[in-house]
Image: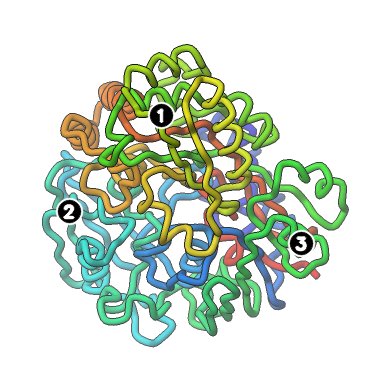
Amino acid sequence: MTDQLDLMIARVRTGAMTRREFVGRTTAMGVSAALAGALFTKAAHAEEPKKGGVLRAGVAGGESTNSLDPALAASDVPYMINRTWGETLVDVDANGAIEMRIAEEISSNADATEWKFKIRSGVEYHGGGTVTADDVVATLKRHTDEKSQSGALGIVQGISEMSAEGDMVTLKLSSASADLPFLLADYHLNIQPGGGVDAPAAGNGTGAYKVVATEPGVITTLERFANYWDSSRGHADSVEILTINDDTARTAAIQSGQVHVINRVDPKIVTLLAGSSDVAIERAAGPGHYVFIMHCDKAPFDNNDLRMALKLAVNRAEMVEKILGGFGSPGNDFPINAAYPLFDDSIPQREYDAAAAAEYYKKSGHDGSPIVLRAAPGAFPGAVDAANLFAATANAAGIPLQIQLEPDDGYWSNVWNVQPFCASYWGGRPVQDQMYTTAYLSTAEWNDTKFKNAKFDELLLAARGELDLAKRKGTYSEMAHIIRDEGGLILPMFNDWVEGRRAEVGGWISDPQGTLMNGTALTKCWLNA
């Protein structure tokens, strides 16, 4: 309860939670109404947002091929940029609850097959004009087009009918989905004028900051949007997002004050930075995970015995200790952990077993040629070291795993989702349906293991419409077993978000939903000096 209360107090301090919301939630947790009111008053006056200045973020995970088209965002820099200039219908807050953004009301029918979203009045685009229900429908329709290459394709494909009437958007689903609002919080689904069909990469949205200039792989500059609708966000005069892929350079940038926040703090230097009075280390445990992905439709990874051999050849405990410095937990080859309410903790933890790995490798009939795993420093923090640890334990089991080092620039367009075996990462999603729909549904654009399983797809659709939580948990458990034992995912570890913040940055809250306060650090934080 203490962690939840701290998160709510932090949201009060940034103006993101009203007294009614705070008192309602805290009394539901067993806090008296009188104490809840006193806590709200104290929190609300503890730290007032300051206006002005230039707030800068140094972010790893960017390249020269990046685009402002939110459909294509696949790494931390474009994710951060798009979260700064754009907004979705709804968001998911640090407590895992739906937060209204472009939509101000949501309702559904009894069996969750039809949903209605009332669009907030007067929300302006940076380029002029206001958001309409037609814009929302056009945006969602654009992401259903496979030509858009949208990371949200798997999410919106389940919508069979979309209509706009006045300020209301109605979505009818091909099958029930109790979690649809969570799915529509996906960061690819920024609402754009006309759906972004004519100019998807224009960066014309409704966020707290508007794009002034962008140089992909280098820097994007944005300035406060004068007509932004939400006064609790957008405190700096302008913000800058600098692509700094090199760990040493990024660390030096925050130490010197060149930037105010950074992502991906190397666990090896946490103690060094934490000892500085100028820099604070922020840590949040959530659903993010570091992975090695195999394409199930390409040899030799189309052989499940070989896939199982590689899964058993990973020393997960060693990776958590040596790569994460303990800032995380072992993975189990399916993308769900205790951050999800319906997680099944009874599934046995997969351990390193050289003998069993060797037996599966022999059974696979592989010809003994090198199995190439591609990795780049920016694939995830410590990716190359993790790949080398993997190679060492696999080689000890008689598996000829070989590491091929790739450059960071172009990695997310030339290697990830293209090459059959590579290092990657996922930020996780608020609910299991979204995680599975985005990356494991057979038809998903971002099905990066090329895993196609009719039974899995059937279970996913059944779970969406299941309102009995016990039954849904059972279905998700069955799906986890399928991914774990048949899929192309090797998930050695779940990572904490470990990030750096200058002491003068105010308004920071711990948000497990994603890196840098789920991409909102620049819109919610301010400079105290």
Q: Amino acid at mark 2?
A: Ile
Q: Position of residue 130 (x, y in %)?
A: 34, 80
Residue 247 higher or lower than 510, as above or below: below
- First in sequence: mark 2 vs mark 1: 2
Residue under pointer 2: 159
Say if 151 sits above or below 302 in the image. Answer: below
Mark 3 residue type: Ile
Q: On the picture, is 161 further left or further right than 261?
A: left
The residue tagged with tag 3: helix, strand or loop?
A: helix
The amino acid marked with disc number 1 is: Gly
Q: Quadrant of residue 242?
A: bottom right
Is residue 19 among the parts visible in the rendering?
no
Where, quadrant-wise, is the N terminus in this rendering? Answer: top right
Q: Secondary structure at mark 1?
A: loop
Question: Is residue 235 visible to us here?
Answer: yes
Is label 2 in a helix, a strand or a loop? strand
Query: In which quadrant of the rendered view does residue 221 lie?
Result: bottom right
Query: At which x and y percent is residue 98?
Result: 41, 49
Label whose residue precedes the other's in the sequence (3 or 2):
2
Q: CA distance from mark 3 to mark 2?
A: 44 Å
Q: Which residue matches tag 3? A: 254
Indicate which disc, 3 or 1, sits on the residue closer to the N terminus. 3
Cα–Cα gap, marks 2 and 1: 46 Å
Which label number is shown at residue 368?
Answer: 1
Q: How many marks?
A: 3
